[in-house]
Image (cartoon, rainbow, N blue to C red):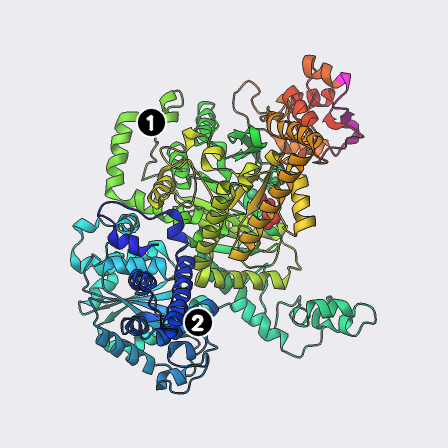
Amino acid sequence: MTTKKEKNAPKGKPDMTVLEFFNVATDRMDEWNDLNSAAIKLKNAQASGKENKALEGEVKELLESKEVFESFWAYPGMALFNEIATHFKEGDYGTFAHAVNRVTRALMSGSYRRGPGAWNLADEAEDDSVGMPEYYEQRDFSRPYFEVLVVDNEPSPEKQKRVRDEMRKLRRPEDPFIYEMVFVPSFEDAVAGAIINHNVQSVVIYDNFPFGSKYNLQSLRERIERYMIHDPDTLAPESYGTALADAIYNIRPELDLFLMTDRRVEKLAGEATASHIRRIFYDVEETNELHLSMIEGVGDRYKTPHFSNLEKFSRRPIGTFHALPIARGKSIFKSNWIKDMGHFYGTNVFLAETSTTAGGLDSLLEPKSTIKEAHELTARCFGSEHSYFVTNGTSTANKIVVQALCKPGDIVIVDRNCHKSHHYGFVLTGAQPYYVEAYPMVEYSMYGGVPLKTIKKALLDLKAEGKLDKAKMILMTNCTFDGHIYNVQRVMEECLAIKPDLVFLWDEAWYAFARFSPLYRGRTSMGSVPILKARYAHPEYRKAYEAFKKKVGDIDPSNKKLLDMHLLPDPDKVRIRAYATHSTHKSLSCFRQGSMIHVNDEDYEELVHEPFEEAFMTHTSTSPNAQIIASLDLARRQAELEGYALVRQQIALSLTLRNEVNNNPLISKYFRILTPAEMIPKEYRGKTIDELNVDTPWSDVVDAWAEDEFVLDPTRLTLVCGTAGYDGTSFKLELMDKYNIQLNKTSRNSVLFQSNINNTRSAISYVISTLAQIATDLDKKLAGDTGFAKAFKARVKSLMEDVPDLPNFSRFHDAFRDNPEGKTLEGHMRLGYFEAYVPEDCDHLDIRSEEMNNRLAKGPEVVSANFVIPYPPGFPIMAPGQVVTREIIDFMLALDVKEIHGYNADAGLKIIKPEVLEKIKKA
Ligand SMILES: Cc1ncc(COP(=O)(O)O)c(C=O)c1O
């Protein structure tokens, strides 16, 4: 956020870019570094007796622009900042440069969190507490540090100092954390503070403050309104306190909010709007209570019951007489042959290895103590009613949810391109998949998301055929591997208008991080639930529904207009039933295979709880890995305390990488990162962004994310490499082998770069320099060798233009359909699947053979006995019981990939014999 620009921006003209919004911490550091360099130059000029007016002007402007911004941070804080500015104003450039340098270094290294030195600008040594006021000496700087945002009506510097000193005196050696306060004077400044300052963990709101900021935070004001439940223009000043709490909650729900008021606290506490406030205090007398409550609030998030217990357990002297020889590590450290295992992994991993569920350790299969508590903390963190840890990845989490919710014969409308765990889930449960198609991106051999119209049509067709009662669940991947994000609220709303008790399983394997950004949260499963619930409970919605009902009447599947209309569910009938599965290990800090299931289902207790437990037992090992469980507990702690900062950084880095690749004249000759316009067809993007660039206006992004059917996750970057003559797989291998850059997903002509909370600016610049190096090499080769240039051109053409059409799901064979004459596509896939287990019921057919060609043209129909899944692209081009078409075989023949699961090229395609199909049909 460039606050200087803000300050000077004409009212009504938002000028914040998307990068400015997310890059706020990095921009701040860059500005301190700029100030530091300028200050050193100024000092040197003064020392050598020279004047430098231009530099002085530059520094003056930097200081002025920083003043607004620094007012949102406790360190260095306005007192130290003003001290710095005074040295400059007085022309004492030596002291000025020393002080700026000290702050810059403290911010870069984070030493202000750990030691008192950084808080005393005059001091030489970094961590020397000599000469510190008493409260600094009391500080145990090994304790985690956070900042408290205090919202108070124009607090004078004297009052700020008094309150700060008062709170500092309350510090006790046994406090597990240390904090400093930052004061803001208005509603708008408070929201800006919560957005900008990621160190903030608690907000203390002193009732009775104005709405507007003295700075022109116009673009922020527009953003604030999106987070407000009430219209700021109609809000009475006495409601500012609770409205501010709501607004901050909508931005960062993890923060602890405290309201200090001299109004009737008892009444306020009972008001619904006060629900996000952790505690309401009667005025300032309660400072000690406030101090303890803030420490306790952060402590609640810091708490990792299972990890802490495991850690404690590892320190106990225990003899193991159960089946886990590596527990305590003796079989390793005393071994003559595998000592290196011990050296590599260290002792703790063995000391913490256990299979016991006694002695204070809990059982994942029947949690009663620490795992149960860890589940509850996780549910709070992710906004669910229930959360569960899973130790075999989302592959298992998905099967658990599908089995908990579906019984044989139930219909699930599902993206055919979804992860294979779902397909196997249908086989296990006997649910009938109704495969629907995502929009294809043929040029890049990949799929996007499933349009809402397609999902609605499937539901309406089921209704027309009298099968809607069997439709149990809608199952979609959000976001997709390649970054397509659904409008979750809209999808749920319109589907619930057709069937009000539908269950939604959103496979958010890639998307656990999304909870921690206000931009993404409304497009997650758990984030959508409270929004929809509040919407349907609102009298305005009821009015809108009644008008809709009057206009449309009952949902009639023969009414073609319904597909283009925004359908509204009946508020008296609708049930909100949402599930999400997260590969926590894919985007947060936990060990591989650590996953979570989150539940927000109004009918969970009555209808699902017991089947869920059964399904959990079905798929969970009786020897779940203790380290994975503990790391899930820790991943939650980190996400709740620093997820906001880390995800913001992740998004900013991705935007930077996008920008550098697409605008660098050398790199962009050969490589391009696909834009929203290239990844999402226009009809699903509404009026908004074609490009997602560093200078895309923030307001456009917010509008798109609020309204569009699909948006692109900026942290998933599809880099086209076909234009550099590489297919996805060879480019991935080259990056790994030659440059130590590891990627996962590829397509025929692209690779996917995913950024995550682990990335740094250095890592991004390494990617940029690597691409520049490859581009330089290509430039050289193309200039020097005409043979190479000719072959290069042909290769690029083949990779970018000779791309096979993506085959749609054809249909299940009639033998596996309840009503072969009907137009709905669901089928009993499980029957087909188990046919493959009977060798005499199956044949193998060479996909290039005459017989295959004849049968595709004239019959009898060829029916797959297996899932056939080529990698890439990684979706099943055939499912058991599915009719094989010419289109599918042509796609297979055009594929130049080596890995095709479910297909043995030597034996041929495994198919079910026609006579067996006839027999099943008649049965
Ligand atoms: C959409 C989706 N769901 C589920 C999974 C399986 O997750 P896990 O690797 O945690 O088992 C994946 C894996 O890539 C995936 O892409």
User: Can the viewer see residue 207?
Assistant: yes
Badge 2 or badge 1: first in the primary sequence: 2
Residue at horizontal 58 percent and vertical 66 percent from the top:
362
- Residue type for callout 1: Asp
In the rendered structure, the answer to whether residue 624 lies left or right of residue 469 reads right
Residue 593, how many percent across, how many down? 61, 54
User: Can the viewer see residue 274?
Assistant: no
Q: Which residue is mark 2?
A: 106
Q: Which one is in front, 206 or 842?
A: 206
In the rendered structure, the answer to whether residue 322 lies left or right of residue 451 reads right
Residue at horizontal 48 percent and vertical 52 percent from the top:
653
Was residue 825 drawn as part of the magenta stretch in this picture?
no
User: Magenta span covers which residues?
Assistant: 837-851
Residue 217, how many percent across, how many down? 26, 53
In the rendered structure, the answer to whether residue 481 lies left or right of residue 543 reads right
- Label 2 sits on a secondary structure element that is helix
Residue 554 is tagged as: 1
Q: Nearer the viewer, mark 2 or mark 1?
A: 2
